[in-house]
Image (cartoon, grey):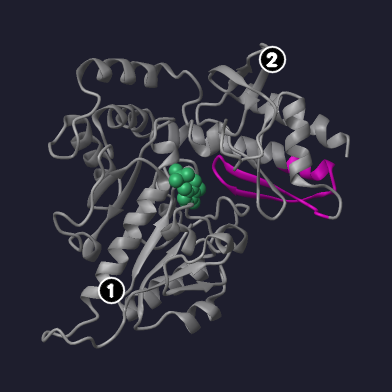
Amino acid sequence: MLLNVYSRYNVIFDKGEGSYIFDIEGNKYIDFVSGISVNCLGHASPVIINALTEQSKKLIHISNLYYSEPQLELAKKLTENSAMEKVFFTNSGTEAIELAVKIAHKYGNNLSYDENGNKIIDKTEIIYMKNSFHGRSTGALAITGQPKYQKPFEPLISNVTQCNFNDVKDLKAKVSEKTAAIILEPIQGESGLESATPEFMQAIKELSEKYNALVIFDEIQCGMGRTGKLFAYENFEIIPDIVTVAKSLGGGVPIGATLTKGKANDVLKPGDHGSTYGGNPLVCAVANAVLHELIDNKLVEKDVVEKGQYSLKKLEELKGKYNFIDEIRGKGLLLGIKFDESKVLAKDVVLKALENGLLLVGAGNNVVRFFPPFNVKTEEIDEAVSILSKVLETF
Ligand SMILES: *Cc1c(COP(=O)(O)O)cnc(C)c1O
């Protein structure tokens, strides 16, 4: 019945509660996938249930022809708690990226002509990183530096240039007057939780200023608290012109956002972009409730930081115990375990963990992601690590 694009695990899930999830046969699992960095408040969160219930009694959808209070409140929360100034709401991460690409193209086109309308340059190039992941649409795929996702679907959008991640020399060779934007994940999610280095971020800052190019941060996976800061850029000495977020923003309801500041704010004009569902009252009400937990109830500042440190300590202990663990990576609760490829495959660890009641998800470069919900309990981390240790024992 389902289009064959996922090799799914052989389990049908029925319900969840907090960090736990149950299949239709009643088997219990600890869920440290969190719907791939989405369910930041865990399953069946009373906060989300309440927001969904209350808002659904008022308005679910009105289109973007009108204002709604939940959408205005969410835009206010996001801009007041960041360096960003304007917001557009989408239904997914990919759509947030598509908008960022459109802004970059129009920004570049605006600068490509002189006052008489003569073309002086083609400033529409987008620089993207090797091993990046930005989504599956033909726009987002074009800047996703993984040939296995791109090749079968060509032609994709053109005038894109790949740069080696964290390679300052390569970046310097590629960014020029023709660059409209540089896009990167501050911490690469799908490809194995490699973080941008301070030197690389510094080079991005300098080159984008020198050539008047936009900087776009894709924080769809690493943003909204998972690193222990609300925005991942707060971990670096740079403020991007555009930030895309999604995943944890809705705690499970489909919502994304493209945030802009400064010269990216007014590139688009009425009629340039739109979305029927984007930012409808229901999803915004849920996101407001999630952000209230994350910001006002200090889930990010306190829980993610503390549970992140605790998890890191426990995973480092595992690394001490098993010599086929190369490295524990990441920040906050955006953690990854990198295995020595010649000895253990990440996908085998994920499968065996599932069989033993622990959900984990792999990433590129032989990494297993460890993504608990933000309100995970210390005992649950202990339980997960103990299952994982039992699993690793078998290799
Ligand atoms: C998940 C993800 C996307 C795509 O988001 P969807 O909601 O699946 O469209 C884009 N970029 C990054 C970094 C992601 O992790």
* Label 1 Cα crowd, 10 Å radius (few <14 / some 14-19 / many 20+): many
Residue 99 vertical placement versus 173 (above, below): above
Q: Which residue is mark 1?
A: 108
Out of 254 and 299, give the one closest to the viewer.
254
* Label 2 Cα crowd, 10 Å radius (few <14 / some 14-19 / many 20+): few
Residue 335 placement, left or right of 175: right
Name the mark on residue 27: 2
Residue 11 placement, left or right of 245: right
Does ligand 1 reach within 8 Å of label 1's beta carbon?
Answer: no
The location of residue 302, given as percent across then percent down, is 46, 34
Looking at the rendered structure, the kind of residue marked 2 is Asn
Residue 221 can be seen, yes or no: no
* Numbered range of the magenta stretch: 316-341
Which residue: 25% across, 74% down?
109
Disc 1 on helix, strand or loop? helix
Q: Earlier in the sequence, mark 2 or mark 1?
A: 2
Residue 105 belongs to the span the image colors magenta: no
Q: What quarter of the picture does the N terminus occupy?
A: top right
Which residue: 61% across, 32% down?
32
Residue 329 belongs to the span the image colors magenta: yes
The location of residue 241, given as percent across then percent down, is 31, 62
Out of 294 and 183, give the one closest to the viewer.
183
Residue 107 vertical placement versus 52 (above, below): below
Q: Residue furthest top?
A: 26
